[in-house]
Amino acid sequence: MSTEDANLVRGCLRDDAQAMRSLVDRFQADVYGLCYRLLHHSHDAEDVTQEVFIRVFRSLRRWDKGRPLRPWIMGIAVNRCRTWMKQRTRRPELVDYLQDAAAAPAADDSTELVHEIQEALAGLRWEYRTVFVLFHEQGRPYDEIALALERPVGTVKTWLHRARLEILDRLRKRGMVPEENVEPPTEIAPARGVKPP
């Protein structure tokens, strides 16, 4: 362990706010980068990164001082990502998907993007809007949505796909999403009597 690491840990154990900030500043980019690569979702990566540092500060007293600090922290990050993936039941929201796909939107642009998505959603057919909200905002699985709407799962998938296409089309026309960056997910059930490729 480096002397710098040892001093940083001692400061954190004394509840020194400056030492805690320094520890976070020193490792945050690496932890976030790892979480993002494992989870493929910026908001999830941010949430897990916060959880990692909470866990680090809770566990510092039990940390083996003979081990280097960075691999220990990265090990916690891997474990938190694994736990997050097991516990994650919600579906990614199209808002998050589009924000990640859009070419580096500014903070003001993301608010505008959310507004545009809400406007596009309001203009959808009732069935499309209902399926979209149940799937993306409520995190309901296809079979549950199908039961709720008394429709086949294939119909639910088709409606969801069409809802996404209509929203993306509106956003492209409004210049909110570049043409080449966004491909809507293609989970469409085959038509009756047609076998999937």
Image: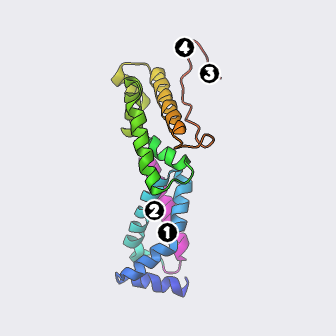
Q: CA distance from mark 1 to mark 2?
A: 7 Å
Dot label at residue 49: 2
Q: Amino acid at mark 4?
A: Arg
The residue under label 1 is which amino acid type?
Gln
- Could you say which is closer to the camera, residue 9 or residue 61? 9
Q: Which residue is mark 4?
A: 192
Provide the major secondary structure of the magenta segment: helix
Is label 4 in contact with label 1 (beta carbons under 8 Å)? no
Crowd class of label 1 (few under 14; some 14 to 19; many from 20; radius 10 Å) = some
The answer to whether the residue labelled 1 contacts the one labelled 2, judged by CB atoms less than 8 Å apart, is yes
Task: Identify whether 32 is placed above or below 165.
Answer: below
Which residue is drawn at the image coordinates 62% and 21% (left, top)?
A: 196
Helix, strand or loop under label 1: helix
Residue 83 lies, in percent from the top left, at 44, 53
Residue 101 relative to residue 47: left or right: right
Identify the disc placed on residue 85: none
Q: Is residue 83 visible?
A: no
Q: Residue furthest right?
A: 197
Q: CA distance from mark 4 to mark 2?
A: 45 Å
Q: Quick one: 59 or 97, which is closer to the camera?
A: 97
Q: Residue 102 at x, y = what percent? A: 55, 48
The quadrant the N terminus occupies is: bottom right
**Mark 3 crowd level (few <14, some 14–19, many ≥20, 10 Å Cα):** few
Q: Is residue 75 shown above or below 26? A: above
Q: Which mark is residue 28?
A: 1
Q: Earlier in the sequence, mark 4 or mark 1?
A: 1
What residue sits 45% from the left and 51% below the top?
110
CA separation in Å, label 3 and label 4:
10 Å
Residue farthest toward the front in the current orientation of the protein: 174
Q: Tag 3's secondary structure?
A: loop
Q: Which residue is mark 3?
A: 196
Q: Specify which label sits upstream in the sequence, 3 or 2.
A: 2
